[in-house]
Image (tube, rainbow, N blue to C red):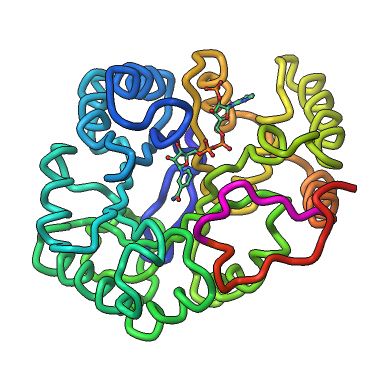
Amino acid sequence: MVRNIKLNDGKSIPAVAWGNGTGGLSAAGKKAVDTGALALREGIRHIDTAQSYRTEEETGLAIKAAGADRKAVFQQQHPDHPEGIKSSVTDSISKLGFIPDLLLIHSPFVPAHGKIAVFWQILESLVEDGTLKGASLGVSNFRPQDLEEVLKIAKIKPVVNLQSFPEFSSPGLHLKELEYHPYVLNHLDPVLAIQAKHGIVSESYGPLTPLLRHPTGGPLKPVLQRIAQRLSKDTGKPVDDATVLLLWTVQKGVVAVTTSGNPDNIKKLVEVDSLPDLTDAELKEIEEVGRKVHFRHYKEHMTKDFPEPDLPQDV
Ligand SMILES: NC(=O)c1ccc[n+]([C@@H]2O[C@H](COP(=O)([O-])OP(=O)(O)OC[C@H]3O[C@@H](n4cnc5c(N)ncnc54)[C@H](OP(=O)(O)O)[C@@H]3O)[C@@H](O)[C@H]2O)c1
């Protein structure tokens, strides 16, 4: 079974994505191919890449090396160069070897100042003229003000047959990738409110930040460890705190864009699909404890002109 999340255009997106922008996998090379192929062979069905990671060719090669059916692997890509958007996109397509399922604007600072709407319209025209045939469009690291700029002009598609997987013909804003985990929820509230109004699904990068990058793990760590013990006992197999945090993420209806270069951890990422759900009380406790703290790791995009909440980093 693969956990999927429905988009507002009727498509489904695999809820656990494996990215090749961190974990020593970016800047191309054999590691991105071999580890990507391993992740696919283990059962990962969604890869995140970007021009700036310099892993587009490696992404295509990993899919080939794994012998995976290209149609069964959801692939998303971020163009990072505002100049000559069409040639930039076609260059990415030729490096990948196919049109990605989803194309994101990597940050609101990729378009020139004041040009987010124009950039978006050019992406829409590339879907319409067939350059990006079948692709969905999304954004990443957009603050409330950036989302509003796109929403003012985007051709939002009405929801069609939710059961089918239709050829995508009319672009709209369906997805937004951002650092998302319990320690940034207070900061994200204004963004998430706009997304909820428009049915825009969140994709979480850095979902394991509370455990991996917070200096102590903070108040969430013991909660996640306790839930991991409960799940291990109930399922009879070892479940760790990171897996619990990923389960929380996908049960929030958020795509978890994580990664691993470690074969054991890759197996655990795949297991998120088959583990039982956390209970409502566990989901609530993780959110309540997380909201007592503000801790962000990737600061470069979301903090400019979007003030962070006045909360402690640890309690
Ligand atoms: N749009 C953007 O601006 C943006 C920004 C940042 C990242 N991203 C994308 O998001 C992807 C993931 O970002 P991230 O690295 O910050 O995600 P993350 O999920 O917070 O961290 C990934 C790290 O978690 C470790 N890990 C995985 N499973 C584990 C487990 N069970 N126990 C302990 N550690 C575990 C992995 O290390 P091991 O290799 O040792 O397993 C890996 O290096 C990137 O590769 C990139 O594609 C996008």
What residue appears at the point 10 percent right and 61 percent down from the top-left corner?
130
Q: Determine the image quadrant of residue 184.
A: bottom right
> In the shown orientation, is residue 218 left or right of residue 235?
right
Tell me residue 214's x, y (percent): 72, 39
What residue appears at the point 33 percent right and 71 percent down from the top-left corner?
172
- The relative height of residue 59 versus residue 286 in the rendered view (above or below) is above
- The relative height of residue 81 versus residue 260 in the rendered view (above or below) is below
> In the shown orientation, is residue 276 left or right of residue 300?
right
Tell me residue 249's x, y (percent): 63, 46
Tell me residue 96's x, y (percent): 18, 38
Main SS, magenta residues? loop
* In the foreground, 172 or 33: 33
* In the foreground, 154 or 108: 108
Magenta residues (range): 293-301
* In the foreground, 113 or 108: 113
Tell me residue 235's x, y (percent): 73, 21
What residue appears at the point 80 percent right and 47 percent down from the top-left corner?
286
Q: Determine the image quadrant of residue 159.
A: bottom left
What residue appears at the point 29 percent right and 21 percent down from the top-left corner?
33
> In the shown orientation, is residue 20 left or right of residue 256?
left
